[in-house]
Image (tube, grey):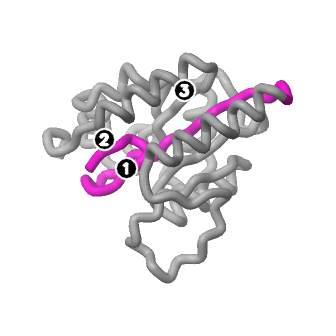
């Protein structure tokens, strides 16, 4: 599976820009350790993010808030400081992010057509999500807020939108 995924160059560029502007970025993902770690390393995301929390290593699965807490701690942040969750699964990513007190961006690819859209924002591509983070981050910076972003990277090769995989 790790050899089937890639990260679009424009997504890597956006991750670099977000981090350069003060964002802390973590990957929070369900899946087996070898599979998910292989994907993170093979795509170059291990160097493009500040941290990652993998359910297969931590023994906690999204939507459990504990996995989000691990990622935030590895970024030197706390969930109490707020932040964002970008993901494509309505329960694991959006529900989990909301339970953790994070604002959410749902990357809706039409997989759950009858799903209620209770995320803060709904987009169809990770680059749209990153634009929201940049825009909202600029507003937060003007008000003096800290920023954190927790990104999704699940095992299905057609998802993991915040990682830019196809």
Residue 29 in sight from this viewpoint: no
Query: Height in image: 156 above or below 13?
Result: below
Estimate how packed mark 1 is, as few (under 14), some (14 to 19) or many (20 or more) residues with alpha carbons within 10 Å: many
Question: Which residue: 73% across, 49% down?
Answer: 101
Q: Circle 2 sits in a helix, a strand or a loop, which is it?
A: helix
Indicate the quadrant where residue 43 lies: top left
Query: Height in image: 77 above or below 63?
Result: above
Number of numbered labels in the structure image: 3
User: How far across and down, in percent of the image, does residue 108 sit?
Assistant: 46, 64
Indicate the quadrant where residue 47 lies: top left
Q: Circle 1 sits in a helix, a strand or a loop, which is it?
A: loop
- Kindly give the residue lying farthest to the bottom in the view shown: 114
Task: Identify the mark at residue 160; answer none if there is no mark.
Answer: 1
Nearest-to-viewer mark from 1 and 2? 1
Question: Which residue: 68% across, 26% down?
Answer: 77
Q: Which residues are magenta?
A: 143-166
- Kindly give the residue lying farthest to the right in the view shown: 143
Task: Identify the mark at residue 44; answer none if there is no mark.
Answer: none
């Amino acid at each position: 599976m790790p050899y089937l995924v890639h990260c679009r160059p424009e997504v890597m560029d956006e991750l670099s820009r977000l981090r350069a502007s003060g964002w802390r970025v973590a990957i929070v993902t369900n899946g087996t350790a070898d599979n998910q770690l292989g994907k993170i390393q093979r795509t170059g995301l291990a160097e493009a993010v500040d941290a990652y929390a993998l359910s297969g290593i931590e023994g906690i699965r999204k939507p459990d808030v504990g996995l989000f807490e691990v990622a935030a701690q590895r970024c030197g942040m706390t969930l109490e400081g707020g932040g964002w969750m970008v993901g494509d699964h309505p329960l694991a990513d959006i529900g989990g992010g909301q339970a953790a007190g994070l604002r959410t961006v749902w990357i809706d690819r039409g997989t759950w057509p009858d799903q209620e859209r209770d995320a803060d924002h709904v987009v169809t591509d990770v680059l749209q999500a990153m634009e929201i983070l940049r825009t909202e981050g600029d507003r937060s910076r003007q008000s003096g807020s800290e920023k954190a972003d927790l990104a999704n990277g699940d095992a299905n090769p057609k998802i993991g939108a915040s990682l830019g995989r196809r």
